């Protein structure tokens, strides 16, 4: 499930549990908006990672000076898009690089 409940009843987006880090704050984008943002001329792919069995993938795009968009592809091919703060992804990148279950695509 992509959200969790908070005490006030609101929900906050979270990455699927297979992703080896957690980011907060995180914004969930619709597929249409996410696709439009990552294919924009201003967006730059920062990295692409694949789960060892090939069932999941994670792509990270720099979209502004301070914002990244993460695209998570699920085992059934759905894409989920999340907006995050660039400094936050920089802080967790070493965790992703060191994760034994994930490898950077060449």
Image (cartoon, rainbow, N blue to C red):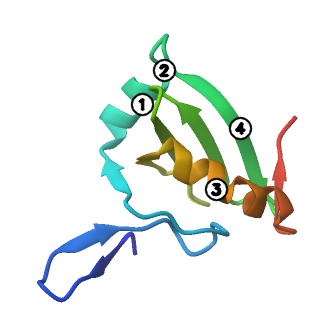
What is the number of callouts on the image?
A: 4
Rendering coords of residue 78 (x, y %): 49, 51
What's the CA distance linking mark 3 and mark 4? 14 Å
Q: From the viewer's perspective, is the residue at label 3 or at label 4 nearer?
A: 3
Q: Residues within 10 Å of mark 4 (few under 14, many from 20)?
A: some
The reply to whether the C-beta atoms of the residues labelled 2 and 1 are less than 8 Å apart is: yes
Q: Which residue is mark 1?
A: 35
How far is disc 2 from disc 1 in space, using C-alphas? 6 Å
- What number is the disc on residue 91? 3
Q: CA distance from mark 2 to mark 3?
A: 25 Å
> In terms of sequence position, does the residue under pointer 2 or pointer 3 come before the other?
2
Circle on res. 47: 4
Circle 2 SS class:
loop
Q: Is residue 77 visible?
A: no
Q: Position of residue 84 (x, y in %)?
A: 44, 48
Q: Is residue 47 left or right of residue 36?
A: right
Residue at x 45% of width, y 16% of height? 40
Quadrant of the rendering where the N terminus is positioned? bottom left
Q: Nearer the viewer, mark 2 or mark 3?
A: 3
| Circles 3, 4 touching at the beta carbon (< 8 Å) | no
Precedes in sequence: disc 1 or disc 3: 1
Q: CA distance from mark 4 to mark 1?
A: 16 Å
The residue located at (23%, 83%) in the rendering is: 6
Question: What SS does tag 1 mark?
Answer: helix
At mark 3, the secondary structure is helix
Q: In the image shown, does 86 or 69 lie closer to the viewer?
A: 86
User: Between disc 3 and disc 4, whose residue precedes?
Assistant: 4
Nearest the viewer among 15 and 97 is 97
Question: Quick one: SS at disc 4?
Answer: strand
97 sits to left or right of 69 = right
């Amino acid at each position: 499930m992509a959200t969790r409940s908070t005490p006030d009843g609101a929900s906050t987006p979270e990455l699927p549990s297979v992703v080896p880090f957690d980011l907060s704050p995180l914004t969930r984008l619709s597929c249409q908006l996410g696709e439009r943002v990552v294919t924009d001329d201003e967006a730059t792919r920062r990295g692409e990672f694949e789960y060892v069995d090939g069932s999941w993938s994670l792509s990270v795009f720099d979209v502004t000076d301070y914002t990244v968009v993460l695209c998570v592809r699920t085992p059934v091919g759905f894409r989920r898009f999340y907006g995050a703060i660039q400094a936050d992804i920089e802080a967790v990148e070493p965790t992703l690089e060191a994760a034994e279950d994930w490898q950077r695509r060449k």
